[in-house]
Amino acid sequence: MDVQPKYKSLYLHKDSRFTFKIMHGSGHFSVSINNTDLAEKLYIEGERTVTIIPKREGPIEVRVEDVEIPESIVSISELLISDIARIEIESPGTLIESGSNMEINVTAIDSNGKEFDDDQYKLMNFNIEIEITQLREKGLTTDIDPQNNRRFIASGKEPGNY
């Protein structure tokens, strides 16, 4: 019997939840988490999934034991509930010619210094703002890619430092 995945970083958001899969075994399991202050577990007897709903930031362990197999080994998966600790911005350069575009990609890093998995980005909202307020629409604009909230297209309108 095994629980998959063995590690997951879950973005702390009011709509966040994650489902672990229980592989193999008899189908009758004892399921627990080591800190109910950080998360709530949803497990229905006979099911092969455990859903975790985060409450606060921090690490927890999801422990599953097969109750019908004598001396079965407890399977443990780790879950880190984290807000965004850091954002990294990637672009192919730092200069944008007037009248041209450049793709800017955003990566969110959890409190353990690891990038969040792709499935966690759907609840994140990113926005790039130009520092010089009065020139926002004039020299440089950024638009989010509607297909990917991690990608922005920066467009150079007029020459200048923005």
Image (cartoon, grey):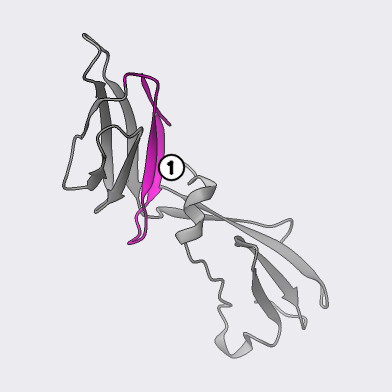
Residue most toward the top? 71
Q: Nearer the viewer, residue 28 or 130?
A: 28
- The image quarter in which residue 112 lies: top left
Residue 89 percent coordinates (x, y): 59, 57
Image quarter where the N terminus lies is: top left
Helix, strand, or loop for circle 1? loop
Any magenta on residue 156?
no
Which residue is at 33% across, 33% downward?
Answer: 78
Q: Which residue is mark 1?
A: 113
Q: Position of residue 16 (x, y in %)?
A: 37, 55
Q: Looking at the figure, which quarter contains the C terminus?
A: bottom right
Residue 3 appears left or right of 95: left
Q: Position of residue 15 (x, y in %)?
A: 36, 60
Looking at the image, how many numbered discs can be counted on the residues? Answer: 1
Local crowd size for mark 1, using a 10 Å CA cut-off: few (<14), some (14–19), many (≥20): few
Identity of the residue furthest to the bottom in this view: 134
Residue 124 % position (x, y): 47, 61
Seen from the viewer's position, the closer of residues 18 and 66 is: 66
Q: Is residue 99 above or below residue 134?
A: above
Is there any visible trace of residue 80 in the rendered image?
Answer: yes
Q: Give, as a single range, the part of the protein colored magenta.
A: 1-26
Residue shown at the point (46%, 41%) measured from the top left: 114
Disc 1 residue type? Answer: Gly
